[in-house]
Image (cartoon, grey):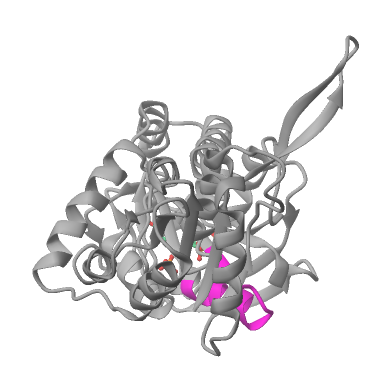
Amino acid sequence: MRVAVGSDHAAFSLKELLLDHLRRKADIEVIDMGTETETVSCDYPDIAFRVGEEIAKKNVDRGVLLCGTGVGMSIAANKIPGIYAAHCHDVETARFSRLHNNSNVITMGARIISPELASAILDTWLSTDFEQGRHTARIAKVLDYERKVCPGRAFSEKGKTVLFEHPLMLHKVSLIRNKDTSVKEFRELVQEIAGLMVYEMTRSLPLVKIEVETPLERTDALALAGKDLAIVPVLRAGLGMVDGILQLIPNAKVGHIGLYRDPDTLLPVEYYCKLPGDIDQRDVLVLDPMLATGGSASAAISLIKKRGGKKISLVCIIAAPEGVSKVHADHPDVDIYAAALDSHLNDHGYIVPGLGDAGDRLYGTK
Ligand code: PRP
Ligand code: URA
């Protein structure tokens, strides 16, 4: 289990003690997320968001947050979709926060409890599993609410399916469904939809403080931190989404996977694969406007995994339930982002109502 630990200045010594305590455990990889000293005051939300984002992005499994009382950390961490932070000052509360609430962050107060009690609470919290059963439905209600208010950011331990509800996106999807939309308009709309989807998906990217010199003075500013992005369109139709994303994230590297669906068997046939050499270091977005049987998307994801890709999401515009099920079954770790979930596939494997053949509509080949 990977555990991120953070504190403000008031709980610095407790953090150091708990880090030592955790480093002695063979089954735990511990990551110190700051702060670095007790002599310089810092703001607890900065640390809470740093740790919480690591969990929301699935870079670590659990988080431990410490401040004077533990309350500020709990309030701040619980603002992050996907974070269920339990503020605990006794072993029983910690145990039930896992058994019943599936908490993924524990917060404690260095000015409230002794280091010995904090260690005992932490041990219980780390070794207790979620009981599931009747509690699963309650947790699902919290997750549903998160999905409603923050569709791009909801969290689950398995791969999730996020359907975007932004009115601009839904309007543009209606336009590309229309059989009378021209090739030029179709191409522009696919770019715009892809850009809007990635805009929503990147809300959670972590930031770091930097200094910038304006024409007037030096000032604090923010810059993107963390892993770089690779986008991998599935040829041909996935190519139609690339420029809309590169306009927002020009530094993303672009891989290409060539697959076509055999018209008789509907199975994907691979004809090209070129990925960035450091694909294992990057968050990977696989792009394909249509998720029909899921064969192409699943094969593309397998190819990326074979070359070392670890954190992969699938971005499609229209998905069919059959494709969503196949990708989640083959790749339970992969999140699917879609602008629409349609009704079913017809006998030829086309999405209904769908938009027809995305490649042909993008490139005017029919
Ligand atoms: C389309 C689409 C997907 C695939 C989806 O590609 O772009 O890649 O079908 O179907 P699936 O989920 O059943 O695998 P197509 O094979 O038509 O190739 P193209 O993009 O070159 O037109
Ligand atoms: N590929 C497409 O382009 N459209 C579909 O409906 C299914 C697969």
Whole-percent x, y for residue 314 in the image: 49, 60
On the rendered structure, is 321 left or right of 265?
Answer: left
Specify whether residue 235 is in view. no
Residue 303 colored in magenta in the image: yes
Whole-percent x, y for residue 79 in the image: 39, 40
Q: Which residues are magenta?
A: 298-312
Residue at the outermost top position: 216
On the rendered structure, is 179 left or right of 32?
Answer: left
Please state which of residues 5 and 92 is positioned toward the viewer in this rendering: 92
When the figure is inspected, residue 25 is found, relative to residue 254, above or below; the finding is below
Residue 360 colored in magenta in the image: no
Whole-percent x, y for residue 169 in the image: 41, 33
When the figure is inspected, residue 166 is found, relative to residue 228, above or below; the finding is above
When the figure is inspected, residue 285 is found, relative to residue 333, above or below; the finding is above
Please state which of residues 248 and 38 is positioned toward the viewer in this rendering: 38
Quadrant of the rendered structure where residue 5 is?
bottom right
Query: Quarter for ligand 2?
Result: bottom left
Whole-percent x, y for residue 67 in the image: 50, 48
On the rendered structure, is 77 left or right of 238?
Answer: left
- At a point 17% along the width and 66% down the height, the residue shown is 136
Residue at the outermost left position: 134
- At a point 83% along the width and 30% down the height, the residue shown is 211
- At a point 61% along the width and 76% down the height, the residue shown is 20
- At a point 35% along the width and 57% down the height, the residue shown is 161
